[in-house]
Image (cartoon, rainbow, N blue to C red):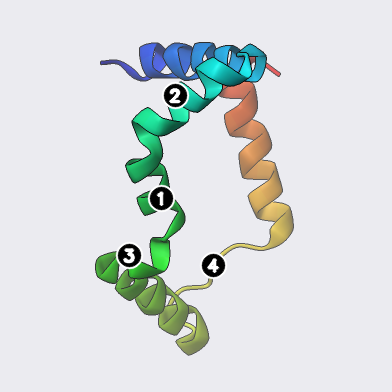
Amino acid sequence: MSLSTSNSIRHKLYDYIRLADDKKLYAIYNLLEGEIDETNEWWKDKGFVEELDRRYEALEAGTDKGFTVDQLATSIDKLRKKMYGK
């Protein structure tokens, strides 16, 4: 599946969920509840936590300079314009 197709599907789902009645909303949630809970419990993912620790240590040691808030905001704006033309 291409990125543009994935983004299109994602936006259709956002729109659908925003407008769904309670019955449909609960049905969707019940279908995905296990995956949603896993996503929200990132601290239980050993590999993810190790990666966060590695990156934090690199920032603290100065081996990774990271990004300033302004650099990050600029990067997000560029990506948003590229993806959505806004």
How far from the left and from the top, in percent, is residue 86? 71, 19
How far from the left and from the top, in percent, is residue 41? 42, 60
Q: Is residue 33 left or right of residue 25?
A: left
Cβ atoms at labels 1 and 3 below 8 Å apart? no
Q: Amino acid at mark 2?
A: Ile
- Relative to the observer, which residue lies in front, 53 or 86? 53
Q: Helix or strand or loop: what does disc 1 sit on?
A: helix
Cβ atoms at labels 3 and 2 below 8 Å apart? no
Q: Is residue 45 left or right of residue 37?
A: left
Q: Residue at x 31, y 75 (%)?
A: 50
In space, the residues marked 1 and 2 are separated at their CA atoms by: 14 Å
Q: Amino acid at mark 1?
A: Asp
Which marked residue is nearer to the observer: mark 4 or mark 2?
2
- Residue holding disc 2: 28
- Residue holding disc 1: 37
- Residue holding disc 3: 48
Q: Is residue 1 left or right of residue 27?
A: left
Which marked residue is nearer to the observer: mark 1 or mark 3?
1
- Relative to the observer, which residue lies in front, 10 or 80? 10
Mark earlier in primary sequence (1, 3):
1
- Residue holding disc 4: 66
How far from the left and from the top, in percent, is residue 1? 25, 16
- Marker disc for residue 61: none
Local crowd size for mark 2, using a 10 Å CA cut-off: few (<14), some (14–19), many (≥20): few
Mark earlier in primary sequence (1, 2):
2
Q: Is residue 20 left or right of residue 5?
A: right
Q: Helix or strand or loop: what does disc 3 sit on?
A: helix
